Image: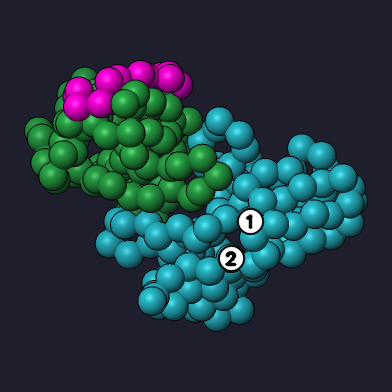
Chain colours: A cyan, B green
Amino acid sequence: DAMVIQNPRYQVTQFGKPVTLSCSQTLNHNVMYWYQQKSSQAPKLLFHYYDKDFNNEADTPDNFQSRRPNTSFCFLDIRSPGLGDAAMYLCATSWAGEQYFGPGTRLTVT
Amino acid sequence: QKEVEQNSGPLSVPEGAIASLNCTYSDRGSQSFFWYRQYSGKSPELIMSIYSNGDKEDGRFTAQLNKASQYVSLLIRDSQPSDSATYHCAENQDNFNKFYFGSGTKLNVKP
């Protein structure tokens, strides 16, 4: 089935140790997103891509970077994770106003 | 980011009742609105979208939009225990390229 896939589903990293989260899609959608969601909070938009055009939210910390090497793949890099970066990271695509979310990656920072 | 406000709940309703979920938004330029259901530990799932003033029905779900008053609501008829989840309202601008979510209302449907 066409879908949005995120790997890994659970990631544990150490304070300050760089980590990369991966997302792939078989939907061939132009737009891809990264959200951060903490417990009982709204998913918070970090970035989105329209094709290769990168759009950064004004309040996304510089510690967060993203890459989209092709239509299918998108990566979230956290350069120096802090304890406050522990969260669920959601990747999504969209087409004609409908968003399709991956299952998320739960990041733990120790 | 844009402001989308929801009562965090929990909203408790008995099985078979109507659950009413509400959302307000601050940006009059918002064009499109969405309701997502999110089960604990899972990712959000789109259940309804609405673009025009008035009501939109899909099975047991009805979305209502009032742009003059800047609110969106979701009615769930014949609520089932499987409807127990957090419901997020989201708005969209920039030609569908950006979505902003509310923090969600937790719904509990009691058998």
Q: Is residue B98 visible?
A: yes
Q: Which residue is mark 2?
A: A6
Image coordinates for residue A69, horizontal then vertical, percent: 61, 79
Please, which chain is the residue tagged with disc 1 on? A
Residue ranking furthest to the front: B111
Question: Which residue appears at 16% of the width and 39% of the height?
Answer: B60
Residue B26, by quadrant, is top left
Taking A80 as reference, is A1 above or below it?
A: below
Question: Which residue appears at 73% of the width and 43% of the height?
Answer: A86
The answer to the question of whether label 2 and label 1 lie on touching residues, with beta carbons closer than 8 A, is yes
Please, which chain is the residue tagged with disc 2 on? A
Mark 1 neighbour class, 10 Å CA radius: few under 14, some 14 to 19, many 20 or more = many
Which residues, given as a range, are shown in magenta? B3-18
User: Is A33 on the left or on the right of B50, as rendered?
Assistant: right
User: Is B58 on the left or on the right of B2, as rendered?
Assistant: left
Q: Which residue is mark 1?
A: A105
Q: Residue A42 in magenta?
A: no
For the N terminus of chain A, give its image quadrant: bottom left
Q: Residue B15 in magenta?
A: yes
Mark 2 residue type: Gln
Question: Which residue appears at 44% of the width and 38% of the height?
Answer: B101
Residue A60, by quadrant, is top right
Q: Which mark is residue B37?
A: none
Residue toward you, A56 or B106: B106
The verdict on a common chain for dots 2 and 1 is: yes
The Cα atoms of the two marked residues, 2 and 1, are separated by 7 Å
Image coordinates for residue B77, horizontal then vertical, percent: 17, 31
Mark 2 neighbour class, 10 Å CA radius: few under 14, some 14 to 19, many 20 or more = many
Image coordinates for residue B85, horizontal then vertical, percent: 41, 35
Earlier along the polypeptide chain: callout 2 or callout 1? 2
Taking B15 as reference, is B33 above or below it?
A: below
**Element class at badge 1:** strand
